[in-house]
Amino acid sequence: MKKFALRSLVAAAALAAASSTFAATDGTAGPSSSNGDFDITLTVATQIITTNFDDMDLDTASATLGNPIVGYEDICVGGIGFAEYSVDLTSQNGSSGGAGSAPFQLNGTSQNLAYTAAFIDDIAATTGAQADATGEVAGTYPRVSNVACGSDNARVIVSIASSEWESATETGDYTDTLTVTVTAE
């Protein structure tokens, strides 16, 4: 009996709260017209997306001694329900996302090479804000696309210093998985 009474009280309180926020007004009878009104509420849930990723293939064959090997990955960041976003870049092999000795790290069979990762909201840029040791990119970026994300509007920049790639002792591939996380602000 007590549970039924408590449930009835909770249901009545919920109904009272719901009806107290209802602002619609019915019209009254008139000789030639009547009007009523109601409020319209659109609830927008925050949605953020990053798309258009491709794998990045870099090689030393086209590299110039003394210069870094740089690669660019153009992506789209979009969404609704927010004006700006922040970015984190993490390396599966590096200490920013794994157990490596460098924040960003390409692993070979027995040797690892460090690299840096940066982000910019401009696909024509050749430099960006470099991720720190935890993977955080400083600052926020304005949202310029919706969830459909029709065209690229941001760039991830990977750079392998000449001191790293010129010290490679193995032939073959050094690999990593770089994760880009965008967060609505």
Image: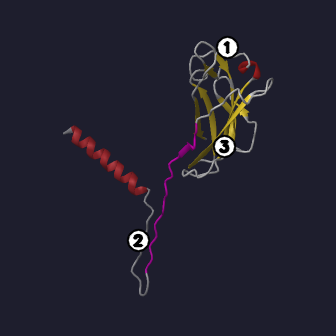
Question: With 113 as the anchor, is 148 left or right in this view?
Answer: left
Horizontal and vertical percent position of residue 14: 35, 49
Q: Earlier in the sequence, mark 2 or mark 3?
A: 2
Would you identify the image quadrant in which residue 3 lies? top left
Q: Earlier in the sequence, mark 1 or mark 3?
A: 3
The CA distance from mark 1 to mark 3 is 34 Å
Instruction: Determine the residue located farthest toward the bottom in the rendered image.
Output: 32
Note whether 174 is above or below 71 in the view shown. Answer: above
Is residue 73 one of those drawn in magenta?
no
State the residue position of label 3: 154
Horizontal and vertical percent position of residue 40: 48, 62
Q: Which residues are magenta?
A: 34-54
Horizontal and vertical percent position of residue 42: 49, 57
Depth check: 27 or 92 in front? 92
* Kind of residue at badge 3: Ala
State the residue position of label 2: 26
Question: With 33 as the anchor, is 152 left or right in this view?
Answer: right
What secondary structure characterizes most of the magenta part?
Answer: loop
Question: Where, quadrant-wise, is the N terminus in this rendering?
Answer: top left
Depth check: 105 or 13 in front? 105
State the residue position of label 1: 169
Q: Badge 3: few (under 14), some or many (20 or more) residues near its Cα, within 10 Å?
A: many
Q: Earlier in the sequence, mark 1 or mark 2?
A: 2
